[in-house]
Image: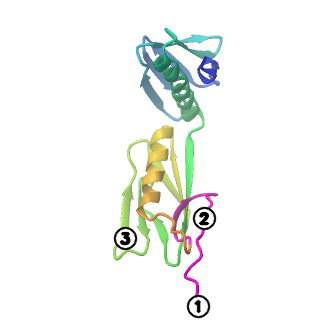
Amino acid sequence: MSRVGMNPIPVPDGVDVAIDGAHVTVSGSRGTLEHDLPDTISARMEDGFVLVERADEQRDTKALHGLSRSLVANMVTGVSQGYRKELEIVGVGYRAIAQGNSKIELQLGFSHPVHVEAPDGVTFEVPNQTSIHVLGIDKQAVGQVAADIRAIRKPEPYRGKGIRYAGERIIRKAGKAAK
């Protein structure tokens, strides 16, 4: 039995959940998100909670049960609180420059600056030259944009230079041993 799928999803004040067959629409103060549930999964509202249920006991259905519940819960959290990923830039001369809410310019030791543009629903904050905050209501989109920015210059293991998630621990290697 899916332990994740059986948990009810609490709906906070200010969030509206509309369920039309297999189509779930969640709207709140930050925006609106939509998701289509698989055929074997259904959802219903009851006493301020969203309950996600499955039709049968097939192995694939059980897996989709927990996944669908997590996706709907992430939608509720996204429209009420939003999601944030923080990135740190480490390296001499490495910096980020904000160009509005949806575009940043990165100086990462290449011969040219790298321009990154945010997709719809994602915004950037650059509180200082060495940190970037990726904000949005869609957890998957925020995580993907942050991963794409990190992939531009991953942290290298010898000096630790590059772009890393805030709090990420980079395993360092020893350099060449002198004889």
Element type at marker 1?
Answer: loop
Q: Nearer the viewer, residue 60 or 117?
A: 60
Q: Is 172 included in the stretch rendered in magenta?
A: yes
> Can residue 100 be seen here?
no
Element type at marker 2?
Answer: loop
- Cα distance in 3D space between marks 1 and 3: 40 Å
Residue named by callout 2: 171
Where is residue 9, by image quadrant? Answer: top right
Please say which color scheme the image uses.
Answer: rainbow
SS majority, magenta: loop
Would you say the residues marked 3 and 2 are in contact, meaning their CB atoms lie under 8 Å apart? no
123 up-or-down from 34: above or below = below
Pinpoint residue 44: horizontal percent, then vertical percent.
54, 11
Q: Please state the extent of the stretch shown in magenta in the rendering.
A: 160-179
Pinpoint residue 46: horizontal percent, then vertical percent.
61, 10
Residue named by callout 1: 179
**Which of the marked residues, 3 or 2, is nearer the chain's N terminus?**
3
Q: Nearer the viewer, mark 1 or mark 3?
A: 1
28 up-or-down from 102: above or below = above
Is 62 on the left-hand or right-hand side of 114? right
Where is residue 170, by image quadrant? Answer: bottom right
Q: Residues within 10 Å of mark 1 (few under 14, many from 20)?
A: few
User: Which amino acid type is shown beneath numbered disc 2?
Assistant: Ile
User: Which amino acid type is shown beneath numbered disc 3?
Assistant: Pro
Identified at 60% across, 57% down, the residue is 166
Pinpoint residue 30: horizontal percent, then vertical percent.
52, 35
Q: Residues within 10 Å of mark 3 (few under 14, many from 20)?
A: few
**Which of the marked residues, 1 or 3, is nearer the chain's N terminus?**
3
User: Which amino acid type is shown beneath numbered disc 1?
Assistant: Lys
**Quadrant (top left, top right, bottom left, bottom right) of the C terminus:** bottom right
Q: Which mark is residue 113?
A: 3
